[in-house]
Each structure stands twice: as C-alpha cells, then as structure tokens.
Amino acid sequence: MTKVLLCVGNSMMGDDGAGPLLAEKCQASPQGDWIVIDGGTAPENDVVAIRELRPELLLIVDATDMMLSPGETRTIDPDDIAEMFMMTTHNMPLNYLVDQLKEDVGEVIFLGIQPDIVGFYYPMTEAIKTAVETVYQRLASWEGDGGFAALEASFEDSGD
C-alpha cells in the first residue's frame, strides 16, 4: 500500500512550522513506509507528484486554527475544510488541493494541529513540538485515523 504524508506549513512562522518539522523528523528517521513530501506553503505544487504515486492513503498535516487549545490535534473531514473557513497561511486553500487529488487518491485524511503563535520569526511553542512528536510516533503503526479524534464541525445545524 502506498501512503503519502504531505506536511504543510511555514517554518519561519512559529507554530505554522508544525508540518515542516514533522517532515524533517521523518526524513531524519523514517516512521513506517510513508513517502514524505514537505509541501511548505505551496502544497499545490506537489499535486503532480502525488497523482503519479496514486497513493491509497494521503495524510495531510498542517497547523490549523480550529479554536482549540494549542497543540490539540484533530482529523478534519476534507469535505468540511471549505465550509469551516479555516485560517491558512498558504497560497491556496487546502480544499482546492484535496479536490484536485480526489480522483487519484484512495483516502485523504486531513490532520490539523491547533497553533498558539503564528507570526514571522516567532519560535515554535512547546505544545506544538509535543503534538508533532505525537503524530510522528503514531506514523509507524498508523491505522484508520491514527487514533486522533475528529473535529466536531461547528458549522453544522445544531438542531435547534
């Protein structure tokens, strides 16, 4: 089974560097049989490479403002990304990337890490480093959603 880990973010912007830190850790000491791509701030540039790999699983990891405590990590349904109006520092919203890849990828899992401080030249906070380490450790034996809880989509009708 081909599995691709697409790490997204900007290492010069504090906690937004969660994805690149994960890619760096995986390249230094691989966990499992993931093909690791550091998508940086323009993951759309990796669409062709991912399409050619035709992975059964694409795991996208990015610092994502989900209004949680710093370092909390959640899976997010890729179909919900656009509706949640998530803050992003990337050139293109990630839902466009996912839409471009749907035909060529078996399953897409989006894993968001709640940042604390995102700003140029800020250091990454300990909560985010710890969250990245948790994701890194789970990669070797990844099954299903990796053991991470799903984000409750707040835009859904609450039934009032």
Image: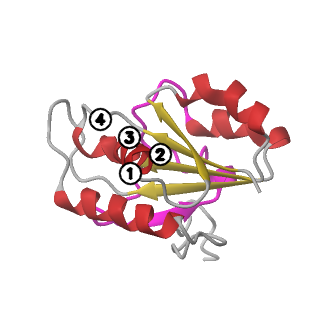
User: Tags 3 and 4 in contact by the CB under 8 Å rule?
Assistant: yes
Q: Position of residue 52 (x, y in %)?
A: 78, 31
Q: What's under tag 3, amino acid-wise? A: Pro
User: Does residue 83 show up?
Assistant: yes
Q: What's under tag 1, amino acid-wise? A: Asp
Q: Nearer the viewer, residue 99 or 7?
A: 7
* Residue marked by disc 1: 65
Q: In percent of the image, x 48 and y 65: which residue is there?
A: 74
Foreground label between 4 and 2: 4
Mark 1 packing: few (<14 Cα in 10 Å), some, or many (20+)? some
Foreground label between 1 and 4: 4
Specify whether residue 77 is painted magenta: yes
Mark 3, secondary structure of its residue: helix
Mark 1, secondary structure of its residue: loop
Give the quarter of the figure containing the N terminus.
bottom right
- Sequence order check, earlier mark of 1 and 3: 3
Separation (CA) of disc 2 from disc 3: 19 Å
Separation (CA) of disc 2 from disc 1: 6 Å
* Residue marked by disc 3: 20
* Span shown in magenta: 64-93
Specify whether residue 97 is painted magenta: no
Task: Residue lying at the far right in this picture: please name it.
Answer: 103
* Residue marked by disc 2: 86
